[in-house]
């Protein structure tokens, strides 16, 4: 069930919120939690009920294993083979559903064999709930977790605002909130903040992201079919996708955090104006912040991080980024996208070490220097997004050739008018100069960062729970609501 669908907005969400607070008001909190679990399972099973068996089985297995690991850890005798078994089972489950077809197709191509495997449909959210539960097992093993009731754990796994596409939440962020009595008491400020976040996120998705998405699809479809594009049209298509995925993921994040707030739950921030970044390292601290946290804490640091010398540090970084790319999708374009970002990060580190070999604090950049750094970082990100969006490597190469005027065909496809650059320019000015929604609402909405801390400076124009701002949010919501379509999924649903 999509957040941007009539059945979700008109039926599911109001009924879930009302039932939740009625049970919280006239019953015990455990009943409100059960209601939210039931609603979340209904939400997940709406697409294909058979996959309820998968997510419930995964949650049950990992909870059971976590309880055993917790008892061993309490006895000061951590059981490493049991932890490895748990991680392996989770990765096998993820690998089968997400990568089995990719593996077979790759073997057929490279070994010229003819292996066959029935097409496996990727279950929704499997990448997200798998990572969350692996982190839980590792923390319990490392004595950083605690014992929970199964109902609390299940709600942590299936909580519908963040279930399908994140944020990738941590149990220590979520469990204490589920256990507070005041979480289940209706707070109108939570409702007002949540509805405002949801409305603005819906507008970003439906009005902005989907509009750019149409143009991006036109350009990349031509590239996938082997057609020739004018250079300016190839750049327009690449910019269109760059803006589509920005507003799509930003909109989803706002909606997810807003939904959580409606239930008295503060989800961690996951998106913080990444196109304002002055280098690629900052980009990854701003884009999909909870994924970056997971990859750092549960992959990069266990590999040795930066504690084993520069060469090993660089290898660890490349492994982390390549696997991060593969997490996004089962295809060589995603692997190369991750590798390209890994190369960006290595170049950025080498430049920083050359510029400041002693690691001393440097003078702040001036406006011109910062502007140039933002443009260079943005260019690098756009080039990588081409790989991320392309249907295959041939389509990506075709797109790059068109962007740099290397196509030899004279039969170019004419897709759209140059005025698209005016719309893209306005959107980029918004991305670079306008305060983000968290800054706009900072006085009443301070979500924790991906590390539990995030300093948000309020913007000069600030939201307040007033009638005027309610009307503004209402207009924003209605303009998006009347533009809903039934076939517009969030891009991160495919991961």
Image (cartoon, helix red, strand yellow):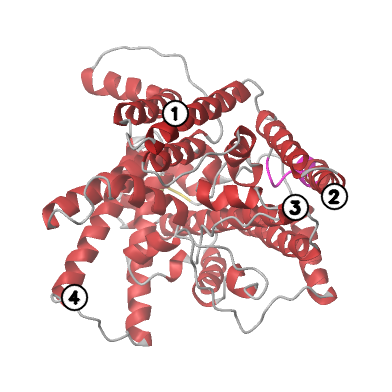
Question: Whole-percent x and y of residue 336?
Answer: 29, 44
4 vs 1, front mark: 1
Residue sitting nearer the eye, 400 or 9: 9
Helix, strand or loop under label 1: helix
Label 4 to label 3, Cα distance in Å? 52 Å
Label 3 to label 1, Cα distance in Å? 50 Å
Residue on which disc 1 sits: 68
4 vs 2, front mark: 2
2 vs 3, front mark: 2
Q: Tell me which segment is drawn in magenta.
A: 2-9
Label 4 to label 1, Cα distance in Å? 45 Å
Label 2 to label 3, Cα distance in Å? 36 Å
Q: Which mark is residue 25?
A: 2
Residue on which disc 4 sits: 359
Helix, strand or loop under label 2: helix
Which residue lies at the image location 34% right of the left edge and 87% below the top edge? 366
């Amino acid at each position: 069930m999509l957040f941007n669908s009539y059945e979700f907005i008109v039926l599911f969400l109001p009924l879930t919120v009302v039932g939740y607070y009625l049970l919280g008001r006239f019953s015990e909190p455990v009943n409100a939690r059960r209601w939210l679990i039931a609603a979340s399972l209904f939400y997940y099973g709406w697409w294909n009920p058979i996959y309820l068996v998968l997510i419930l089985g995964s949650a049950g297995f990992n909870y059971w294993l976590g309880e055993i690991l917790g008892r061993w850890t309490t006895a000061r005798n951590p059981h490493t083979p049991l932890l490895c078994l748990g991680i392996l089972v989770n990765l096998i489950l993820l690998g089968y559903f997400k990568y089995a077809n990719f593996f077979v197709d790759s073997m057929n191509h490279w070994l010229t064999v003819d292996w066959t495997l029935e097409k496996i449909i990727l279950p929704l959210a499997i990448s997200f709930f798998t990572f969350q539960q692996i982190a839980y097992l590792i923390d319990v093993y490392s004595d950083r977790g605690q014992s929970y009731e199964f109902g609390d754990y299940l709600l942590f796994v299936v909580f519908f605002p963040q279930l399908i596409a994140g944020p990738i939440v941590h149990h220590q962020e979520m469990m204490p909130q589920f256990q507070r009595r005041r979480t289940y008491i209706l707070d109108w400020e939570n409702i007002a903040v949540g509805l405002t976040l949801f409305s603005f996120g819906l507008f970003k998705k439906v009005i902005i992201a989907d509009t750019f998405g149409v143009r991006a699809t036109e350009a990349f479809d031509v590239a996938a079919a082997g057609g020739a594009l004018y250079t300016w049209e190839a750049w327009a298509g690449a910019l269109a996708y760059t803006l589509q995925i920005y507003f799509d993921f930003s909109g989803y994040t706002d909606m997810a955090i807003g939904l959580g707030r409606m239930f008295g739950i503060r989800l961690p921030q996951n998106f913080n104006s990444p196109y304002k970044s002055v280098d690629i390292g900052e980009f990854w601290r701003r884009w999909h912040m909870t994924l970056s946290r997971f990859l750092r804490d549960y992959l990069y640091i266990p590999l040795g991080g930066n504690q084993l010398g520069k060469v090993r540090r660089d290898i660890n970084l490349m492994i982390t980024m390549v696997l991060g790319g593969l997490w996004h999708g089962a295809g060589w374009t995603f692997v190369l996208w991750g590798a390209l970002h890994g190369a960006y990060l290595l170049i950025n580190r080498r430049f920083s070490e050359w510029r400041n070999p002693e690691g001393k604090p440097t003078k702040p950049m001036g406006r011109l220097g910062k502007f140039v750094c933002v443009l260079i970082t943005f260019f690098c990100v756009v080039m990588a997004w081409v790989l991320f969006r392309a249907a295959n490597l041939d389509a990506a190469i075709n797109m790059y050739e068109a962007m740099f005027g290397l196509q030899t065909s004279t039969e170019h496809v004419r897709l759209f008018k140059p005025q698209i650059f005016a719309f893209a320019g306005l959107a980029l000015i918004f991305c670079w100069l306008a305060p983000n929604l968290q800054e706009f609402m900072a006085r009443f909405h301070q979500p924790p960062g991906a590390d539990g801390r995030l300093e948000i400076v309020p913007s000069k124009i600030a939201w307040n729970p007033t009638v005027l701002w309610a009307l503004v949010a209402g207009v924003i919501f209605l303009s998006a609501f009347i533009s809903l379509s039934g076939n517009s999924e969030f891009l991160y649903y495919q991961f």
